[in-house]
Amino acid sequence: MLHTLENLTVLQIEQLFDSPALVVLLIANADGTIEKEEIEKAIEVVHIKSFSEYANVKEFYSALEPDFSRRFHYLLSVLPTSKNERNKEIVKRLTSLNDVLFLLPYKFSLHFYRSLKNYAAHIANAAGGLGGFFAISEVEKQFLHLDMIFEPTHHTE
């Protein structure tokens, strides 16, 4: 287990490890269709973040990488199939992540928050568009900034 997460419950750790897959599902499903390019980009970006992310968040992505595809497909299978219901459930789950982030050391929670927002932008740009332009649809834009997750402002260290 990651040292940074040692004070969390198993459920809270699962919430953290599910959050990147939930971000993918929220952004990719915003238009009602999860495209192959979005899934491929999601897996690729988790891999990249395992060695190029903030130092204190790299370890998280390294631990997530081998299990990311399974988590993504599991969440896809258990979440509602209706676009609106799925998005509501994902927003609810990501909103509950705020409580977990508050329990973590400030720098880790801030870097993790910024990493998720960056991740959302990568997914939104993964499919669609014309020559790299207009890749983010209007419906993706409504979720792109992950407004349900608040920027950490606390300090627990």
Image (cartoon, rainbow, N blue to C red):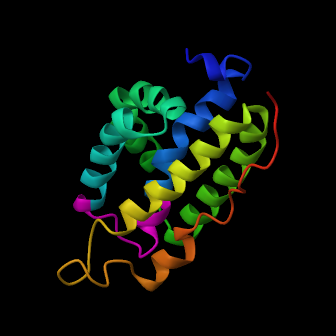
Give the residues drawn in magenta, as a range: 26-37
From the viewer's perspective, tell me whether residue 8 is left or right of residue 79.
right
From the viewer's perspective, tell me whether residue 50 is left or right of residue 8.
left
Q: Residue at x 67, y 28 (%)?
A: 11
The verdict on residue 94 being magenta is no
Q: Residue at x 58, y 43 (%)?
A: 112
Look at the image and tell me in which quarter the C terminus lies: top right
Q: Where on the picture, by quarter, is residue 62? A: top left
Circle count: 0
Q: Is residue 79 visible?
A: no
Q: Residue at x 81, y 37 (%)?
A: 155
Q: Is residue 106 visible?
A: yes
- The one nearer the camera, 101 or 14, is 101
Q: Where on the picture, by quarter, is residue 14? A: top right
Q: Is residue 19 above or below residue 143?
A: above
Look at the image and tell me in which quarter the N terminus lies: top right
- The one nearer the camera, 24 or 145, is 145
Q: Residue at x 66, y 66 (%)?
A: 147
The percent coordinates of residue 86 (x first, y second) are 55, 62
Q: Is residue 155 above or below residue 90?
A: above
Farthest residue to the left: give it. Answer: 131
The percent coordinates of residue 19 (x first, y second) are 55, 45
The percent coordinates of residue 84 (x first, y second) are 56, 71
Q: Is residue 121 above or below residue 128?
A: above
The verdict on residue 31 being magenta is yes
Q: Is residue 7 above or below residue 123?
A: above
The percent coordinates of residue 110 (x first, y second) are 65, 45
Q: Where on the picture, by quarter, is residue 127? A: bottom left
